[in-house]
Amino acid sequence: MKFQNLFFLKIVFFLLFFSCNNNDDDDNSDDNPLAIRDAAEQAIVDDNILKSYLETHFYNYEDFSSAPNDYSISIKIDSLDESNDDKNPLINYVQEKEVIVKQDGIDIPQKLYYIIVREGKGVKPNNVDSTFVSYKGSLVNGFIFDQRDVPIWFDLAKVVKGFRMGMTNLKSGTYEINLNGTYTFKDYGQGIFFIPSALGYFNNSVGGIPAYSPLIFTVNFLTLATADHDSDGLDSYLEDINLDGDPLNDDTDQDSAPNLYDPDDDNDGVFTINELDKDGDGVIDDTDGDGIPDYLDPNISS
Ligand SMILES: [Ca+2]
Ligand SMILES: [Ca+2]
Ligand SMILES: [Ca+2]
Ligand SMILES: [Ca+2]
């Protein structure tokens, strides 16, 4: 894959990838058509839709096995019919991962399916890093709601959860800068994500995507940048204080700014960057030895 001026394309894409929170203050009554559906029930509906899709479609796996180093090949999905019923369906290739969403404060597991077409030879991103990707997003009926052949930077902290968690299974690639200033990427991860609606836009209808739509993405993951959203000296993935794998749900001082976006995590008036490692020995400071590092300990503010 060859591109020009890649690193000037670091633009934010607002519309389709802006993750929406499930609104949980409506009731779930069946008589109210505007009521938000029960996420556990919807998970079953979506899983049936996705499984049926996986059983009735295939991808061009033969292209990849016959030319393992040819990065001009892109992933193509097609439906199985009489002319190609010797192909292996997608279901033979998928892996799955349970991802939790919350509705009304209750944890509800969702099943994310993914296929690693090529794993990639670089490194896996943390789920809040910035990733440089090209992709195609479609619905199970084949409707393409978004496509980027020229790659774009995505902040995984801001995309839908299914895409974020899918990306953590792929590895980045390598690139060479050509004499004419273009970049050539190779050895990058390529995959397909099959996303239930609760890990997508759920009850929101966005950019041609009806509410409660499962989403399918084919993705090329070219390279990444480790993110430190609040520039406090701690990479964002390290701000997952409760170690549940999700740095977006940690808010030590309860001021509604999650730690990864909060330059003063303990709200003691001293910026995290100024109390992280005052003696510069490379070890995060815990002055009073109580097991709570200074930057999270409001009792230590000097
Ligand atoms: Ca940070
Ligand atoms: Ca967390
Ligand atoms: Ca905070
Ligand atoms: Ca502080």
Image (cartoon, rainbow, N blue to C red):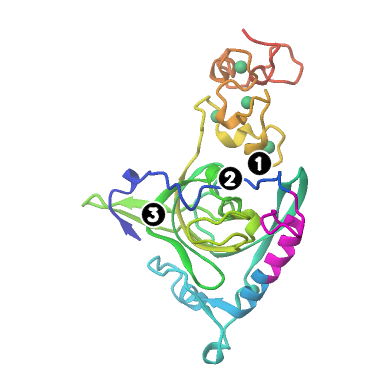
If the picture is divided into quarters, which one holds ligand 2?
top right
Query: Hey, which quadrant is residue 8 in on the image?
Result: top left
Q: Of label 3 and label 2, which has the lower sequence position? A: 2
Give the amino acid at mark 1: Asp
Label 1 beta carbon less than 8 Å to ligand 2: yes
Q: How far apart, in angstroms, are the residues tagged by discs 1 and 3?
A: 26 Å
Q: Using the image, determine if residue 216 lies above or below residue 198.
A: below
Q: How far apart, in angstroms, are the residues tagged by discs 3 and 2?
A: 19 Å
Label 3 beta carbon less than 8 Å to ligand 1: no
Residue 273 forms part of the magenta stretch: no
Give the amino acid at mark 2: Asn
* Badge 1 density bin: few <14, some 14–19, many ≥20, Cα 10 Å: some
* 283 relative position to 143: left or right: right
Residue at the spot 77% in from the left edge and 16% down from the top edge: 290
Question: Which mark, residue 127?
Answer: 2
Q: Secondary structure at mark 3?
A: strand
Instruction: List the residue tagged with mark 1.
Output: 246
